[in-house]
Amino acid sequence: MRDVIAEQKALALEKFIPIMDDEGSALLVETVRNEQPEKILEIGTAIGYSGTLMLTASPKATLVTVDIDEERLSYAEEFFEAAGLSKRVRIIKEDACYLLTLLEEKFDFVLLDGPKAHYSSMLDYLLKLTTEDATIFVDDVGYLGLVDNGEYPKHKHRTIVTNMRKFIERVESDATLVSERYGQGVMIIKKCKNPNC
Ligand SMILES: C[S@@+](CC[C@H](N)C(=O)[O-])C[C@H]1O[C@@H](n2cnc3c(N)ncnc32)[C@H](O)[C@@H]1O
């Protein structure tokens, strides 16, 4: 039997495709395993590595996953097939910012691992598209350590860093959300049913 996870990691390395690191992946698997979500939305499919991890950790879950990169999505499709997961996955090739304006279904788990400069503008859509006790797992909020260093960002990273800081501030000041940071990378956001939870 093929070891799809090992193949995905090898391909990502060979083709310089960014996928979640081992620490983030382990936390993702642990979170999904504990919560057993049924409907997962993933922003940022790449080659299907994190999608494969989530579907394996939550055997009843289905996944809607979006990416803008056609070549990566064709690898993802092949890997989901090889892992026997295709029937539980809907792959969408689209700009995630646009897709979020179109979706109407509700998800109980989101993995946000796509265009970092747009997380702050995606947040309201994600809150609308999720159930009242959903979890939003965000990877790489620290962005190369530049988000938390308190410095004015250099031109090349300015939009991402400024917008990521806005995203974090917005999450942390929302009384209907509980969030926790893990290392420099991951933020786990839980929606809570009661105000001021
Ligand atoms: C860090 S990678 C995702 C890694 C994946 N979650 C994993 O760990 O296996 C981020 C992905 O977001 C995609 N992306 C960037 N901008 C996007 C956009 N506007 N809409 C959809 N996908 C986008 C990139 O093509 C890239 O594959």
Image (cartoon, rainbow, N blue to C red):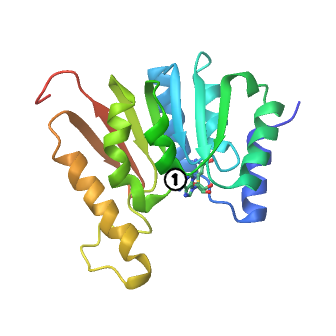
Residue sitting at x 24%, y 26%: 192
For residue 193, side relative to residue 132 (left or right): left
Residue sitting at x 80%, y 47%: 7
Q: Quadrant of the C terminus?
A: top left
Give x and y (percent) for residue 90.
Answer: 66, 31
Height in image: 141 above or below 50? Answer: below
Q: Nearer the viewer, residue 70 or 45?
A: 70
Residue pointed to by mark 1: 114
Residue sitting at x 47%, y 24%: 105
Question: CB of residue at label 1: within 8 Å of ligand 1?
Answer: yes
Give x and y (percent) for residue 15.
Answer: 76, 64
Helix, strand or loop for disc 1: loop
Give x and y (percent) for residue 109.
Answer: 45, 29
Height in image: 187 above or below 157? Answer: above
For residue 83, side relative to residue 184 (left or right): right
Height in image: 179 above or below 13? Answer: above
| Number of residues whose C-alpha sits closer than 10 Å to that of mark 1, classed few (under 14), some (14–19) or many (20 or more) | many
Residue sitting at x 42%, y 65%: 143
Give the residue type at disc 1.
Answer: Gly
Q: Which residue, as the protein is rendered here, is positioned at the far front?
A: 102
Q: Which residue, as the protein is rendered here, is positioned at the far right?
A: 1
Task: Please identify the quarter of the rendering in which residue 85 is found.
Answer: top right
Q: Which residue, as the protein is rendered here, is positioned at the far left?
A: 196
Give x and y (percent) for residue 165.
Answer: 28, 62
